[in-house]
Amino acid sequence: MAMSSNPQVNRTPADLPDDPEGRAAVEVDLFGQHLFFLRNRRLAALQRLISDADARSQLGTIRRRAYDAVASLDNASKSACLGLAQAAIDLYMQDFLSLLSSSGTALKLGDDHAIRYKLTMQVIDMDHNILWEDAITQSGVRNLPGYFGRWLNAYKSWGLEPPEEPSKIRQLDP
């Protein structure tokens, strides 16, 4: 199955709300769509590598070992391994979202300083001119880990079955 390397979003800048709060909500959801596109693409790749010896043969010996080991298991064990991989990816995503959403001084840098990360979204034209730029993690919306469940429900958990069109991201409701 050929998968697109980039998600497709069926919106234009003109479709995005003018008000900052509305636009921030759409920007956060677009980020979630892209994040879950990557998650789902990775899960489909894991499934393919476990089920397809030819795909595994394209990997180097060291990278291939874990996939060969899982491929040798019975179907129930393969399914359990893929479920565990999905859970690990989801937990990592939630941890990463928490890291991006830190707005206080929890990430200490010595006694008198702290580190804070900022996720910024830019909308550019095809000549790379910035049309606008917004800080998603500091836009007044809920912090990103709070969106994980909503994104999971909206952009589906694959389990072992990829969606019909993995290159298509669900369009936001207007």
Image: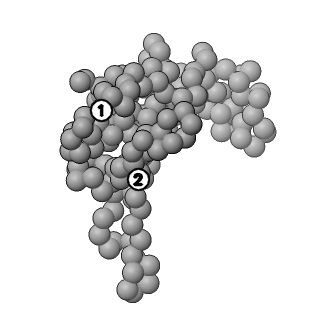
x, y percent for residue 149: 27, 38
Viewed as shown, does residue 74 lie left or right of 83? Answer: right
Task: Measure how far apart labels 2 and 1 are at the Cα level.
Answer: 19 Å
x, y percent for residue 4: 57, 23
Depth order, front residue of 76/31:
31
Q: Secondary structure at mark 2?
A: loop
| Residue occupying the point 61% across, 17% down | 2
Q: Amino acid at mark 2?
A: Leu
Judge the density around disc 1: few (<14), some (14-19), many (≥20) Cα neighbours within 10 Å. some
| Residue occupying the point 77% across, 27% down | 57
Is residue 130 visible in the rendered image? The answer is yes
Residue denoted by label 1: 16
Judge the density around disc 2: few (<14), some (14-19), many (≥20) Cα neighbours within 10 Å. few
Q: Which mark is residue 28?
A: none
Is residue 71 visible in the rendered image? The answer is no
x, y percent for residue 96: 42, 53
x, y percent for residue 36: 42, 34
Q: Which mark is residue 119?
A: 2
Q: Quadrant of the C terminus?
A: top left
From the viewer's perspective, is the residue at label 2 or at label 1 nearer?
Answer: 1
Q: Quadrant of residue 83?
A: top left
